[in-house]
Amino acid sequence: MVKKTDEIWATGRRKCAVARVRIKVGTGKVVVNDKEMNEYFNSEALCGYVAQVLKASDSEGKVDIVASIVGGGMAGQAGALRHGVARALVKMDETLRPALKAAGMMTRDARVKERKKPGQPGARRRFQFSKR
């Protein structure tokens, strides 16, 4: 078990975003890039996406989370934070792994933007065909 003074570090990734997450036993405060989570993720959906992990592990109001996120957009950053928090919670308490894995929060979402191919304007887009 983890002591009250211990901090657990974990990394979460989604698309191009990388979240370095620190959790410790506390009162439920979530700070992202030196801002409150509700202030940083101004969408209720993104805040709820991150809160899913805390609900699934029954950790709401029990841990303080401090995260540093770089890269990607808001949705990717929220996904990276969710992944990082899930990994940190499992480091803190290994018995949470089955519940979080069943909810799909331990899996790194490997979907990334497809690369642009040479000789065409986008990843799948082709230049307009003209018969004459």
Image: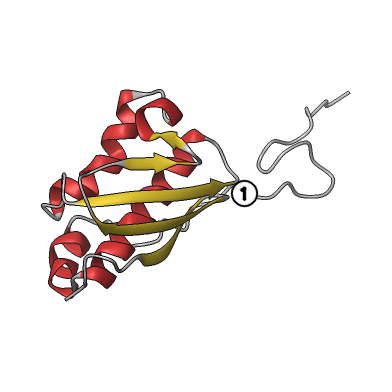
Horizontal placement of 12 versus 97: left or right? right
Quadrant of the snapshot with the N terminus: bottom left
* Circle 1 residues within 10 Å: few <14, some 14–19, many ≥20: few
Q: Residue at x 24, y 69 (%)?
A: 92
Task: Say which of 25 and 21 sits in front.
Answer: 25
Task: Say which of 103 and 8 sits in front.
Answer: 8
Q: Is residue 15 in view?
A: yes
Q: Residue at x 40, y 49 (%)?
A: 66
- Where residue 23 sits in the image (x, y, percent)? 32, 58
- Where residue 81 sits in the image (x, y, percent)? 40, 49
Rendered image coloring scheme: secondary structure
- Where residue 82 sits in the image (x, y, percent)? 34, 49
Compared with residue 63, is residue 106 higher up or lower down, i.e. above or below? below
Q: Residue at x 28, y 72 (%)?
A: 91
Q: Report the amino acid beneath label 1.
A: Glu
Horizontal placement of 10 versus 59: left or right? right
- The tally of labels here is 1
Compared with residue 100, is residue 113 higher up or lower down, i.e. above or below? above
Q: Quadrant of residue 32?
A: top left
Q: Which residue is mark 1?
A: 114
Quadrant of the snapshot with the C terminus: top right
